[in-house]
Amino acid sequence: MLKPKVLQSIFATGILIKLNYINEKRVGVIFTHAGVIGPIFGRKKIKVMNNLINEQKGWLEKPI
């Protein structure tokens, strides 16, 4: 979760990903949703997450 400095205690940026095992050195990453997460009002937390239209893929690799 990323929090802008100005609104640090109120809003944050949220990103959801899917991880998949490739091999012992690499894990695949697919970014699926992005949006804003806000404060709690009553019993609900404000959350606006949208599907990413253009699929973003990558991987994490274990250093040697």
Image (cartoon, rainbow, N blue to C red):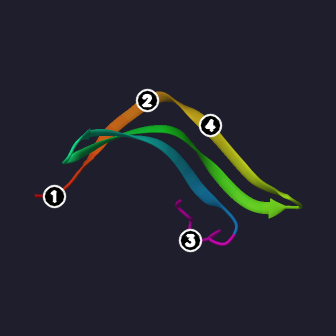
Residue 63 is labelled as 1
Image location (x, y in percent) of residue 10: 70, 67
- The residue to which callout 3 is attached is 5
Horizontal side of 23 relative to 51 (left or right) equals: left
Q: Is residue 48 above or below residue 10?
A: above
Task: Identify the residue at horizontal 71%, vertical 58% (top origin).
Answer: 38
Chain-order first, disc 2 or disc 4:
4
Three-letter amino acid code of the residue under disc 3: Lys
Please tell me whether mark 1 or mark 2 is closer to you in this view.
1
Three-letter amino acid code of the residue under disc 2: Glu
Please tell me whether mark 3 or mark 1 is closer to you in this view.
1
Image location (x, y in percent) of residue 20: 36, 38
Horizontal side of 62 relative to 43 (left or right) equals: left
Three-letter amino acid code of the residue under disc 4: Asn
- The residue to which callout 4 is attached is 50
Q: CA distance from mark 2 to mark 3?
A: 28 Å
Magenta-highlighted residues: 1-9
- The residue to which callout 2 is attached is 55
Task: Identify the residue at horizontal 62%, vertical 71% (top origin).
Answer: 8
Q: Is residue 15 above or below residue 8?
A: above
